[in-house]
Image (tube, rainbow, N blue to C red):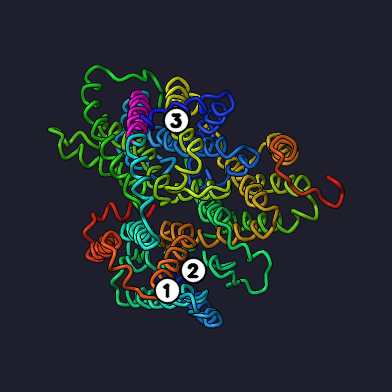
Amino acid sequence: MDTLNHLMTGLAAAMSLQNLLFALIGCILGTLIGVLPGLGPAAGTAILIPLTFKLDPTGAIIMLSAIYYGAMYGGTITSVLINVPGEAASVVTCFDGYQMAKQGRGGTALGIAAIGSFIGGISATIALVVVAPPLARVALSFGPPEFFALMLVGLCLIIGLAGRSLLAGLTMAVLGLLIALVGIDPVRGAPRFTFGIPSLYDGVGFIPVVMGLFGVAEILLTVEKPYRQVIDTKIASLLPSREEWRRSLGAIGRGTGIGFFLGLIPGVGAIIPTFVAYVVEKRISKTPERFGQGAIEGVAAPETANNAYANAAMIPLLTLGIPSSPTIAVLMGAFIVNGLTPGPFLFQERPDLVWAVIASFFLGNILLLILNLPLVGLWARLLHLPYQYVCVGTLLFCIVGAYSLQQNMFDVGVMIVCGVIGYGMRKIDLPIAPFVLGLILGPFLEKSLRTSLEMSAGDFSIFATRPLCLGLLIVAGLVLLASALRLAPAEVREASND
Amino acid sequence: MRRGWLVACACLLGVFIAALVTSLGYSLSDALGPGPGFFPFWLSAIGAALTVGMFLEITRGRMQIDAGVTVLPDRSAALQAGSVLIALIAAAVAFEPLGFRLTMLPFIAGLLAVLGARSWTAIALCAVAGSFGVFHVFFYWLKVPLPIGVFGI
């Protein structure tokens, strides 16, 4: 009953004209980011953070969340129409979506993707409302050792699923953690790795690093190999036929379940639920040979899973303060920029904000359905925009974004340097996700480790004597062991590297 | 690709060793428990060990690397990426002295031309909108302070 009251209060706040407008702007910008190939949701969300500087925190988080799940929706359009995923999670949609478009069924593919995304998003948000408050209450009983172990599990999952080498994933996570230490020591107040440079006393900003790694690096790669801009598909009917509905309904239901449950696990990136949903549909189908040839379930299941994941992934962030992916880490950065620390205390300290944001997910999903079904032709037309204008526009917003964080050229320099580093990392396929997660979790991980050791007067056995902490550490170890033994399917490991 | 990984290993090892040496200057522990140097020291040490492990993994052929894939771009692609980088650095240098509008106007126009945009009308419109228009939106509407240069623009 208490939850329902909170939700109703949140809904009233989210439905205020101002917040509704922020959600609408966020959905439009997010869809735009998703539609434009080369600009992923992590970079897109990061470069648009300055737009929210003068908003109140509730409006800012509502808008940035809408940008995030809007980008998840928008990525489908390019996957279906030009076989280029707008963001990594839409890779799987290319398999059957593009084939459907080539058969003149592009409109149906986009229609079922929008409907599936809507159902997946709304279902996951309902589940979020049910699951988040009790989980936050449980998390309140966690001490620093449990939080340390939990963050380690999240990091290990990202590392374990990252790319071609476990060692590479571990190394990048350690590098991220190390760079997060630059600045004033949060416990003792001593400067570390600052080399007498005043700008380094506040640490290396997370947002300029992400803008560089994802935004500038992506532009450098795009100008090397410009994407295609030719669309030779007509968007006719958006609604599926009766037979297509019959095939899709089960896929949408299963996609919702898969997306939601994988969204609850910290460290599982957006692409894994879509991949799992696709594989499940193919395995249970009586005609698996249709997959890859334009099977509508091959679009419905991953797109539903994608959006269910996007909404469910907010649960670990809001209740535990653990981001599930680089994009969620950017959202976490936005919370921090607005003076908020995601985690169980947020439900106690700012229930007005948390519930308004959760309620805005319902409204955002409805707005996205409206934006995506009737206006799909308009979005498709944006694909004619020459890549030069997209690249220059992105760089412009990167510069404005990095500078306006602290009105400081140092952050612009950090962004450019990280752009070059990110370009190199992408070239040789070094995993970026563990680095980003290490960077955002670094201060929290260090603080919880040191507070734990202060509690035990430096005795490390504190981590073994608390059952939950020990259990979580065992899980973290098992994840790394499974990765070392390469138990996860190769495709999942490769996919999660994106 | 293999050479790229080896270069990455060398860079990472350099960073971790430098961090390790620097962290020796911070106290590892104090009366309350672990000190400011505890986390940096162990992270640098672990990072250096992992990098050595990664190096061995590469040299012993245990890491799957697409040996045939060339990391370095061809001449025209390198010129395009290099132009973007030079433009970014130039914009960063001129940003505060010249101000946002006077920096972004040539940045946008020049970069669009270098990247192959051919319509001069579109280039001019984009440059004006991206410099004066964006400044107006951020500075006056969103109240985000952007630099005004020595010429007061």
Contact, CB < 8 Å: mark 1 with mark 2? yes
3D distance between C-alphas at marks 1 and 2:
9 Å
Q: Please name the amino acid that badge 2 sits on.
A: Leu
Q: Is residue A489 above or below residue A253?
A: below
- Label 1 in the same subunit as label 2: no
Tell me which residue sits at (24%, 56%) in the image. A488
- Foreground label between 1 and 2: 2
For mark 2, does the 10 Å Cα neighbourhood hold few (<14), some (14 to 19), or many (20 or more) residues? Answer: many
Q: Please name the amino acid that badge 3 sits on.
A: Ala
Q: Is residue A66 above or below residue B103?
A: above
- Foreground label between 3 and 1: 3
Magenta part, dominant SS = helix
Front position in the image: A322 or B71: A322
Query: Where does label 3 land, which residue?
Result: A359
Front position in the image: A59 or A129: A129
In this view, the residue farthest toward the right is B151
Based on the picture, tell me whether residue A116 belongs to the magenta stretch. Answer: yes
Left or right of A174? Residue A469 is left
3D distance between C-alphas at marks 2 and 3:
37 Å
The part of the chain drawn in magenta is A108-127
Mark identifier at residue A178: 2
> Where residue B138 appears, x then y in whole percent?
70, 39
- Label 2 in the same subunit as label 3: yes
> Where residue A56 appears, x then y in whole percent?
61, 37
Front position in the image: A291 or A41: A41
Based on the picture, tell me whether residue A419 belongs to the magenta stretch. Answer: no
> Where residue A211 appears, x then y in whole percent?
55, 52
Query: Where does label 1 land, which residue?
Result: B47
Q: Is residue A178 above or below residue A492?
A: below
